[in-house]
Amino acid sequence: MSSAPSIETHEEVMFFDTDLGGVVHNIAYLRFIETARTRLAAQLGMELKEMAATQLYPVVTRTEIDYRKPATLGDHLVFQGELEKFNRSRFWCQFEIRLRDDIDKLLVISRQCLALVQMPKGRPMALPKSWQKDFPLCYRPSS
Amino acid sequence: MSSAPSIETHEEVMFFDTDLGGVVHNIAYLRFIETARTRLAAQLGMELKEMAATQLYPVVTRTEIDYRKPATLGDHLVFQGELEKFNRSRFWCQFEIRLRDDIDKLLVISRQCLALVQMPKGRPMALPKSWQKDFPLCYRPSS
Amino acid sequence: MSSAPSIETHEEVMFFDTDLGGVVHNIAYLRFIETARTRLAAQLGMELKEMAATQLYPVVTRTEIDYRKPATLGDHLVFQGELEKFNRSRFWCQFEIRLRDDIDKLLVISRQCLALVQMPKGRPMALPKSWQKDFPLCYRPSS
Amino acid sequence: MSSAPSIETHEEVMFFDTDLGGVVHNIAYLRFIETARTRLAAQLGMELKEMAATQLYPVVTRTEIDYRKPATLGDHLVFQGELEKFNRSRFWCQFEIRLRDDIDKLLVISRQCLALVQMPKGRPMALPKSWQKDFPLCYRPSS
């Protein structure tokens, strides 16, 4: 039985990720999450190079992010992401961030809703029909 | 009668705020919002210079942000922010972003929850008692 | 007698500009400088909105930046920029960054070389002929 | 015979690295270079975690960067960095950025000078004596 598409990515906290509070700045996590989401999108059939060619882009329409525990310089972060659900025009991803060296410690959770948009006109497009066949467990037509 | 503390800030979209989709990147808005929030925090008695001295910082514990319409290079953005509510240990701010030259067009809305944290230990601190007197309309002790 | 085009911009150091060393991160200054350069470019006849329409962009081909003294959270920074020189295809700008409240303290100096590029083809374009008439003191045809 | 310490890192260009010109924004390369420099610093005995503990940080005092050819979304970039030279108090690193899939194409070159600084006082410190023994080919006492 097929399960939800999912990925795992890793990041090491650099100086530019931190602020003078001594911990990772809240905005830096969104950059990490975008990298994780890009890997997930590739699994969903959306490759960066192809997007650049077709100008058909997944666009974030909503982000929710909860910061539970801080990370700091040199920490190794583990990002687990998966497709949560989709309907005809939007899909939701969710992400959990943990410390590699203390893997039970949940630092950050986030959910993002995305839509497909054809640039440069900004026209919203339906998600590929193939998703319903490929990821049936995540399909929520009326959500 | 006192109303909720509020601010208005302005930004002009630079190259580094955009991505190759031709519009402002979703993460860039969070930087703008932090600038607006910093002005709002100053109204609430939290000045940057004082924070740097005391190491008592407001820390974002949750962000919700909805992207409704895009902005692009050279757009003048108007940020309206206000204190939504607070209890003993946390406060919520909300922000609306509009185009200066089409002010009815709502581009982005966001809410953020913050807590006061004493660094470098990371100890959560109560909000100042004075807030209950100064901003009574926003006080929600049980929320 | 005409002098070199010049601008002055101001920035206040935010949390996201700092790192856990307690001072402004070296990369953050480049963002500030881009904002100053954008104001300078407007004086040279290159408006952001017009660039977005024509896709004729000034592109940085070289940056030199010296970090002499640090700035920190809440500091008010003053950016002075001017056109240093130009030939037929490239122009140089220079920037000095000082503390508003200790204006003799020079924090950072930077020089940037730029060329005009027609996107999306990436074709290099000559600078406008009018510059030689408008900014004669900065014209160095053989540099 | 010992040679100069050197590293190679890899990055894939994300949306947030690009601007609406359709290519990687000039500032984004500095972030990539910082990641490469951090790997190089680890070879030189400066580990992120140890820095966070000792607050003895390498601080960039000068950056030179030449942008020769653009990269775009989804490009795989290869960063080659090495220690160029050092004296008692400063060291220089140099970096070259190429396309993984067209490795002879040199996109960007950069040099950075760094000094060791003891925070929070900001006191400049001598480089470790051991460097003269470990990296003799790079030692330039009078430069």
Image (cartoon, coloured by chain):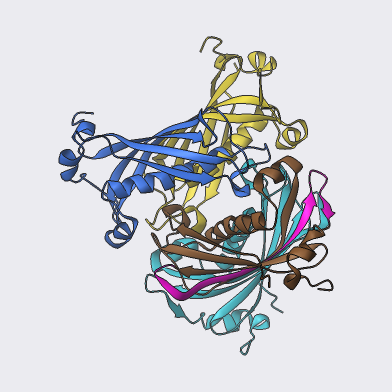
Chain colours: A brown, B cyan, C yellow, D blue
Residue C67: in magenta span: no
Q: Nearer the viewer, residue A125 or B135?
A: A125
Quadrant in the rendering for residue B87: bottom right
Which residue is outermost to the front? Answer: A1
Report x, y in % for residue D84.
30, 33
Residue C139 visible? The answer is yes
Which residue is outermost to the top? Answer: C142
**x 66%, y 71%: residue:** A3
Report x, y in % for residue B127.
52, 80
Quadrant in the rendering for residue C48: top right
Residue C19 is left or right of residue D127, and the answer is: right
Residue C99 visible? The answer is no
Give above or below for D118 relative to A140.
above
Quadrant in the rendering for residue A80: bottom right
Q: Which residues are magenta?
A: A100-125
Q: State whether the magenta stretch is mostly helix, strand or loop.
A: strand
Q: Nearer the viewer, residue B85 or C104?
A: B85
Give above or below for B57 relative to D16.
below
